[in-house]
Image (spheres, grey):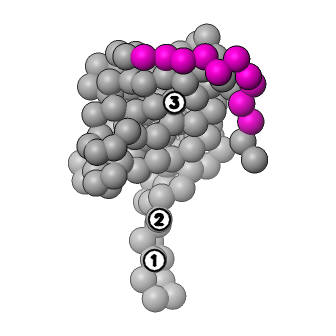
Amino acid sequence: LYLSAQGGILFFYRVKDLQYEMKICVDILKPISSLIFSPDYTVLLLVTDQGTVYAYKPAHSGEAVKLLDTCSSCFLAADFLTPGDKYCVSVTISGEVQVWFLEDGTCLSKLNLDVQVHVT
């Protein structure tokens, strides 16, 4: 089980029967708004409400790598485009939908919905 704390810390909990073990994986120092696994569960996207997306590879137990950083409008959500884990799509609060190439953070396409987006 992966979860994040308000301060930007990603935790891993291994639960077995009535026992659990907790591990701090990474601290990105920014509040994490959502966690999204790639379809093959090799990459975990950490999305902040400040417009930054990080990649964390649980098998490598390393640092989170900053993939995307936008200051124009904060990300509301992001997810992988399947199949694979090379592209993601994001939506901002202002209603801009963007497709990103995750290897180098290039924005490949964007569409403005001309409506403010909310999560319900």
At label 3, the amino acid type is: Ser
Query: How far separated are the C-alphas under marks 3 and 1?
Result: 32 Å
Q: Residue at x 71, y 30 (%)?
A: 117
- The reply to whether discs 1 and 2 touch (Cβ–Cβ < 8 Å) is yes
* Badge count: 3
Question: Could you tell whether 102 is left or right of 116 in the image?
Answer: left
Q: Which residue is mark 1?
A: 15
Toward the top, the furthest residue is: 72
> Is residue 115 on the magenta stretch?
yes
- Residue 45: numbered disc: none
> Toward which corner of the image does residue 105 lie, by quadrant?
top left
Q: Residue at x 34, y 32 (%)?
A: 87
- Residue 1: numbered disc: 2
At label 2, the amino acid type is: Leu
> Is residue 80 on the magenta stretch?
no
Query: Magenta stretch?
Result: 109-118
Residue 51 seen from this side? no
> What percent of the width, then of the height, locates residue 83?
28, 45
> What percent of the width, then of the height, locates residue 108?
37, 16
Q: Nearer the viewer, residue 5 or 67?
A: 67
